[in-house]
Amino acid sequence: MARALLLLRVAVARYPPLPASPALLQPLLRRHAPSQYRSQLRFLSSLSSSSVSTSSDAPSDGGGGRDGEEDGAKSGGRVDYLGMSDEELMEQCDMGTFKASGPGGQHRNKRESAVRLKHLPTGIIAQAVEDRSQHKNRASALSRLRTLIALKVRRPINLEDYTPPVELLQILPLKSSVRGKDVGPQIGPNNSKFSPGMQALLDLLFAVEGSVSDAAKILGLSTGALSRLILSDDSLRTAANELRASKGLKPLR
């Protein structure tokens, strides 16, 4: 019996690419096993066959691992929400409408013209209630959503090989030494393109632990010039001061 079991193990080990079917083991059973043990050995060989075929049908570790890594890379990668078109950004939002309260007359409250947008990837909510047109409120809410994404969503920066992106260069003063002549005139807070530059500036401030002087050196500006840029917009100033407070730094004034 012991010899037959040993031969069974040898047979299974000898044919790893193939299922260890009972057909392969029958000669061994007939030749070496006593008659009273043959039924038990057939049962053992069938178990061996089923276990090998199950492992061959399952996905390989290599294939499953690659799929997981690709999914992780996609979810953890840098997403440029502000670079999306209005339609693409709206596809990521849950839109709700409601009746606005407050001044505006009865016509304002008859229809659900107010719009609330929730950006599902980030959870940021923006709304607009001031117009009687739902279409105009939707556009206003989307514009506010872009601003809030710029203020709240931080993207990682590698300072070792950092180069200021174009959207950041566009909001810098002309005196910046890293700002090329081909960038064009400086963009101010009232320009719709200011939000991407504001986001890039806050990303840099976050990377340098809130230090305006360190960020100014990277951007080719004096500390005072960068401080004035930050203070030129109320929302940018608030976001920068909140970031600095989280690092134990004094607010800009």
Image: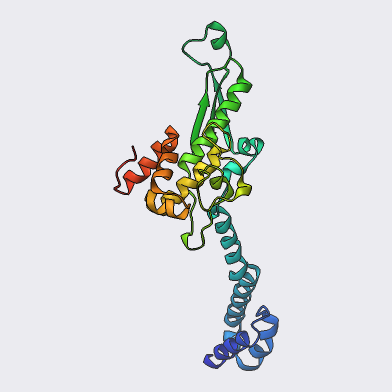
User: Where does residue 181 sit, x and y in percent of width and height?
Assistant: 61, 48
User: Where does residue 209 sit, x and y in percent of width and height?
Assistant: 37, 52
Direction right: furthest residue: 23
User: Where does residue 120 sit, x and y in percent of width and height?
Assistant: 54, 39
> Looking at the image, can residue 60 be seen?
no
**Is 191 situated above or below 80?**
above
Viewer-side residue, 148 vs 49? 148
* Colouring rule applied to residues: rainbow
Viewer-side residue, 86 vs 12? 86
Which residue sits at x=51%, y=30%? 126
Viewer-side residue, 197 vs 26? 197
Which residue sits at x=69%, y=89%? 27
**Is 63 situated above or below 226?**
below
The quadrant in which the C terminus is found is: top left
Direction front: furthest residue: 175
Number of callouts in the render? 0
The quadrant in which the N terminus is found is: bottom right
> Looking at the image, can residue 223 be seen?
yes
Viewed as shown, does residue 143 lie left or right of 229?
Answer: right
User: Where does residue 88 sit, x and y in percent of width and height?
Assistant: 65, 39
Viewer-side residue, 82 vs 167? 167
